[in-house]
Amino acid sequence: MSMIRDLRAVVRPSSRVSLRKDTSPSYDTTRAPGTSSAVVDCAVYRDGARVESAGPLSPQEAMRLVRRDGGFVWIGLHEPTEAEFAGIASEFGLHPLAVEDAVQAHQRPKLERYDDSLFTVFKTIHYVEHDRLTATSEVVETGEVMCFTGRDFFITVRHGGQGSLRALRHRLQDDPELLAKGPSAVLHAIADHVVDGYIAVAHAVQDDIDEVETEVFSPGRKGGVSRGVDSARIYQLKREVLEFKRAVAPLLRPMQLLSERPMRLIDPDIQKYFRDVADHLARVQEQVLGFDELLNSILQANLAQASVAQNEDMRKITSWAAIIAVPTMVCGVYGMNFDHMPELHWKYGYPVIMGVTVMLCLGIHRTLKRNGWL
């Protein structure tokens, strides 16, 4: 029970700030002096504590320490090139296919098992704050975190400007008992950190959908038809939700495998906590699928309202055309310039014809208004 509390305290700090209040991306591209230009941090952990060194460690030096004295090395990289990653891949014996995926990025979330390592891909999601949703608003921004988990090493490769793991590393270092569980504890912490980000983004996207839904169904003109929402705004939000779904849906199966299937690189005490991550991820997936269906309904409702508005406009145009047709017909008759038209020489012909025309127009107007056409 003590370990449960510690694990949750580390990967889920209680002092959370609302995503709407603090949505600035955490850029963490500082390179460790004296290391490869892509290495953000490189450290050796033994018995849950970070091993202090006289200066920055290179990945090769860190691995030599681990092989000599035990523990594991955690290396963090940010957008390495193939040349920058080649030495690390060779030192740790990483599979070429996994290395290629880590360098090129743009991968689907997945879990791949190789002889001596696990390769896991996470899609990170960042909510892009905006004052008002438009047809070109970016709602979510994605990045990637690739993780290589071995018996005595853990390597993270980040792509994108957001998704920093610096704060998570510091929280783990503050809990030696958890970090002593090895690389699998770090893998769980990152998985939980990523999924917690999904939950926060889902709440923010829900607010955007609620706002659009309110505008669509709020009466903006007579007849309850609102023209305050452009269908392009709804479609843009739907595209952003689709991008969110592409990050969430493929990750569910890897989390289930990590929580259900015994793996020699995953500590048994840590494996059961992946169930909690998988459960939270399943709930986020349900939310995202619900967003997609709801946006479909909102889009259809908005298009139906636009069709109703067009029909109403056409009825009004038709009604006024019918009213104008009466004086047009009368003027047409009296504009034919016949010599023998009795009304032309009648003293009261003009006022009578004008009066009849006005009465007919008023009668048609009243009838159309009563029927809701005007």
Image (cartoon, rainbow, N blue to C red):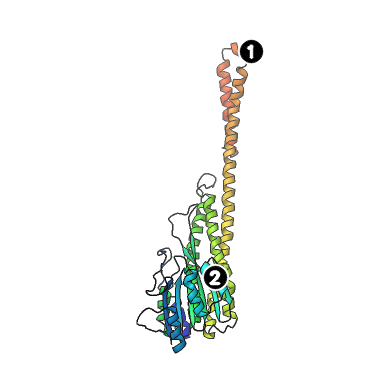
Q: Is residue 18 left or right of residue 248?
A: left
Determine whether 325 is above or below 211 in the image.
Answer: above
Question: Dot 2, how many residues are within 10 Å of its Cα: few (below 14), some (14-19), or many (20+)?
Answer: few
In front: 40, or 131?
40
Residue 22, x across and y down, in percent: 40, 65
The answer to which of marks 2 and 1 sits earlier in the sequence is 2
Determine whether 356 is above or below 80 in the image.
Answer: above
* Circle 1: residue type: Phe
Assign a secondary structure to mark 1.
Answer: loop
Residue 301, x across and y down, in percent: 58, 52
In front: 80, or 10?
80
Determine whether 352 is above or below 187 in the image.
Answer: above
Would you say the residues marked 2 and 1 are in contact, meaning their CB atoms lie under 8 Å apart?
Answer: no
Q: Residue at x 57, y 26 (%)?
A: 359
Res 338 label: 1
Q: Quadrant of the C terminus?
A: top right
Determine whether 323 is above or below 278 in the image.
Answer: above
Residue 82, x across and y down, in percent: 50, 69
Question: Dot 1, how many residues are within 10 Å of its Cα: few (below 14), some (14-19), or many (20+)?
Answer: few
Q: Marks 2/1: CA distance?
A: 93 Å
Residue 249, x across and y down, in percent: 58, 68
Q: Is residue 73 left or right of residue 323?
A: left
* Circle 2: residue type: Glu
Res 246 label: none
Residue 321 visible in the picture: yes
**Residue where numbered disc 2 is placed:** 100
**Mark 2 or 1: the one toward you:** 2
Identify the image quadrant of residue 265: bottom right
Q: Residue at x 56, y 84 (%)?
A: 264
